[in-house]
Image (cartoon, rainbow, N blue to C red):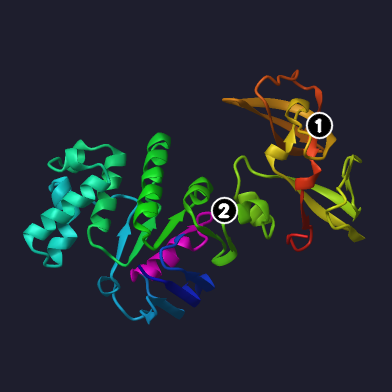
Amino acid sequence: MVNVSLRGLKKSYGSVAVVHGVDLDVYDGEFIVLVGPSGCGKSTILRMIAGLEGITDGELSIADRVVNHLGAKDRNLAMVFQDYALYPHMTVADNIGFGLKMHGIPAGERTQRVKEVAELLQLTPYLDRKPRALSGGQRQRVAMGRALSRSAQLFLFDEPLSNLDAKLRTEVRTQIKLLHQKLQMTSIFVTHDQTEAMTLADRIVCLEGGRIAQIGTPEELYNFPRNIFVATFIGSPQINLLEAEGHGRTLTLRDGQVLEMPSDIAALEQKRPVHLAIRPEDLTDESRKNSTDIFQPLDMDYLLAETVGSDTFVIGELDGTRLTARCASTMRPDLGSRIRLHVNVGRLHLFDRETSLRI
């Protein structure tokens, strides 16, 4: 196991800066997920940690040792790539044991370690097969097995699930989570999928434009987003955003509707323009209201409904803004009708409209 420390880490390609002074500590045995949209710098940071990209400025330490100028092979880490990177002419057993062979591990020890990893990843029945005879999920597990067989001090995952279909993504994601719970290996995982980040991470590092927007547990980023970017990136369906004027505990929407915040939320001392953010589960129909929360009505124009099992996501429009509400599966308004939903005002999120920061 190992800790990782990034201090002022920067990366530029010529005059174009892509990572802007990132500070991050990854603790021993922790599962960290770097998440963000394409081009935010998450894979570049991972590749700098791996030694596959040079560091323009700053300091990178692994196990309390500065490794800026060490090559990838000298950092004692293992990496799982998006495209599996398996040797098509080798069997599963040979693919898993390839790194061990290159490091001069004797055949007997190599065979034993391959066997242990195969059992861990439920690959034992496939050890004599070639990659072409495996499903996408099985190939990705072989790639993970090759990494695990090396007993590396640090494991890096570069969007390893993005080539899999939805069902396989869920299966392999579960396998990764179970492996981490069992082995407690220090891991850094890169993804653009916030669902993967929320389900896998001990802590999430949400990146925007080569900078850290927020670091925290999945619950912290979901319930207390630091700014509008984090609020809108984390959560599915996406959080609803409305413009309002806030004063005291009163929020006046652009169409004149008023919401009153409960007394346990700090009042706004001065009148100010705000973004009001509402999670879809906090905007619902009459049947989903409960007695423990404070709900207030919100009227909008009904557009359509999307049923997902026991839930129906009702999509409406308020003063030109689309809103999504999580409602009972039986809710079926008439097309084009005006509907009344209910807001859990105790779970509102307010952001300054000028700075986009949480109020």
Label 1 vs label 2, nearer the camera = 2
Q: Which residue is mark 2?
A: 218
Question: Does residue 61 appear to the left or right of 302 in the view shown?
Answer: left
Q: Is residue 4 above or below residue 207?
A: below
356 is within the stretch colored magenta: no
Q: Is residue 13 visible?
A: no
Residue 228: x and y, percent? 69, 55
Q: Position of residue 42 (x, y in %)?
A: 47, 61
Distance from label 1 to label 2 (Cα)? 31 Å
Q: Quadrant of the C terminus?
A: bottom right
Residue drawn at (38%, 48%) of the image: 178
Q: Residue at x 40, y 43 (%)?
A: 174
Q: Helix or strand or loop: what does disc 1 sit on?
A: strand
Pointer 2: residues within 10 angstroms few (<14), some, or many (20+)? many
Res 170 seen here:
yes
In the rendered structure, which disc, 1 or 2, sits on the residue that comes first in sequence?
Answer: 2
Residue 159 in percent (x, y) is at 40, 52
Give the residue drawn at x 79%, y 38%. 343
Q: Quadrant of the N terminus?
A: bottom left
Residue type highlighted by circle 1: Met
Left or right, 222 with respect to 300, comes to: left
The residue stretch that appears in magenta: 32-52
State the image coordinates of residue 180 (x, y, percent, origin top left). 38, 54
102 sits left or right of 181 in the view: left
> Which residue does the image show at 12% across and 65% down from the upper left?
105
Residue where numbered disc 1 is placed: 300
Question: Does residue 263 appear left or right of residue 275 in this picture?
Answer: right
Which numbered circle lies on residue 23? Answer: none
Query: Is 187 located above or below residue 55 in the figure?
Result: above
Confirm whether the magenta stretch covers residue 36. Answer: yes
Which SS class for mark 2? helix
Type of amino acid at the residue the image marks with label 2: Pro
